[in-house]
Amino acid sequence: MAYSVKKNWILSFEFIWTKPVVILPFFIIAFLEGLALELLNFSAKKPISIIAGPIIRKFFGENALHYPGNILILPDLFYYAETAIYIFISVFLIAISINVFKNIRQDLPVKRYALIKNALKQYPSFIIFGIIMICLIVFLKNLNLLSFSKITSFGLRHLPGIPTQLYSIALLLCLFFSNCVLQVFLILTLPLMVIEKKSFLKALGESLYLAFRNFFSLFGLILLPYLVYFPVWLLKVESVKLAQKTFPEVILYIIGAGIIIGAVIDCFIFVCASQFILYKEIRKSS
């Protein structure tokens, strides 16, 4: 039985459509991120400013406590909030969603307390995974920025005819595709931990091994969903510039859209990854 990326997409979409309970953990993540965004939006107003005000003033300056500066710093503030939510909550809830997928596919009961109990047993491993993911994403971002700063300075000296905007576009594309490649190597870690009940290190090792053996299949599997999300990601990256040219509140709309669309895309990707693991098990047993 040959593996088909297209068939995986179809099966994953049908599963989410007919069993929407699998997307519920991602909507909980979206709700928490939306709540964090709302709190950050009012961080310059009392009573939140009593705690947040001195911190914002120290790191972003006095202007960040007044309009429109308090809106323009939202992408940075939300990034830190989103990172904390991802490490301590999102990975945990994603694991629960994967367990829901596994139980439904294997005709097992979906019991809320059992799902939470099983996920709690691996909670320390989920935190470690979340920290590793964030560190690698930050490392790749800084590596790309460093590389392109050198390329840009070289180009400006020796190839002055190339527009500087071209370097910015190339950097954004490089950031996007490098993140896709990173996901290829790590996306199977959580499904392996949940579906095959592997320890964190074994799941991580097998995820890397399967990525090397099935790189193009996995890359194709996640590329289309990420391309759907790409316009939103691009708007988030350029949101401050866009706000300065239009109106500051556009940042709230962009981040809010990113939260909702991101929840759907992430659910689809992890269902696809879990579907891939089940296919691997079926092929091994046959």
Image (cartoon, rainbow, N blue to C red):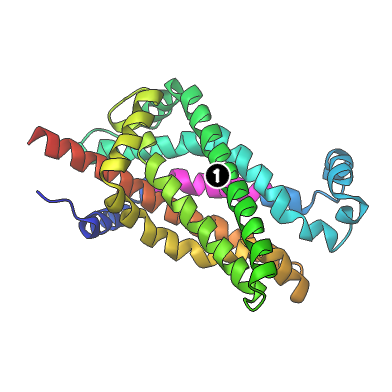
Q: Position of residue 123 (x, y in %)?
A: 48, 25
Is residue 19 one of those drawn in magenta?
no
Is 62 located above or below residue 278 in the figure? below
Classify residue 128 as left or right of residue 147: left
Q: Position of residue 277 (x, y in %)?
A: 25, 39
At 41% from the left and 35% from the top, the residue drawn is: 95
Can residue 6 be seen in this snapshot? Answer: yes
Classify residue 74 as left or right of residue 189: right
Q: Position of residue 59 (x, y in %)?
A: 84, 44
Kindly identify which residue carries mark 1: 137
Q: Residue furthest bottom?
A: 161
Q: Main secondary structure of the magenta part?
A: helix
| Magenta range | 23-36
Is 261 located above or below residue 84 in the figure? below
At 64% from the left and 67% from the top, the residue drawn is: 155
Is residue 29 one of those drawn in magenta?
yes
Is 217 located above or below residue 169 in the figure? above
Q: Nearer the viewer, residue 206 or 77?
A: 206
Q: Nearer the viewer, residue 275 or 134?
A: 134
At 77% from the left and 55% from the top, the residue drawn is: 73
In the picture, the quarter occupied by the C terminus is top left
Q: Position of residue 258 (x, y in %)?
A: 56, 59
At 57% from the left and 62% from the top, the residue drawn is: 172
* Amino acid on which disc 1 is placed: Ile
Q: Residue furthest front?
A: 158
Classify residue 85 as left or right of residue 286: right
Q: Nearer the viewer, residue 187 or 271?
A: 187
Q: Residue furthest left?
A: 286
Element under label 1? helix
Is 199 located above or below residue 44 in the figure? above
Marks counted in the figure total: 1
- Residue 238 occupies which quadrant of the picture? bottom right
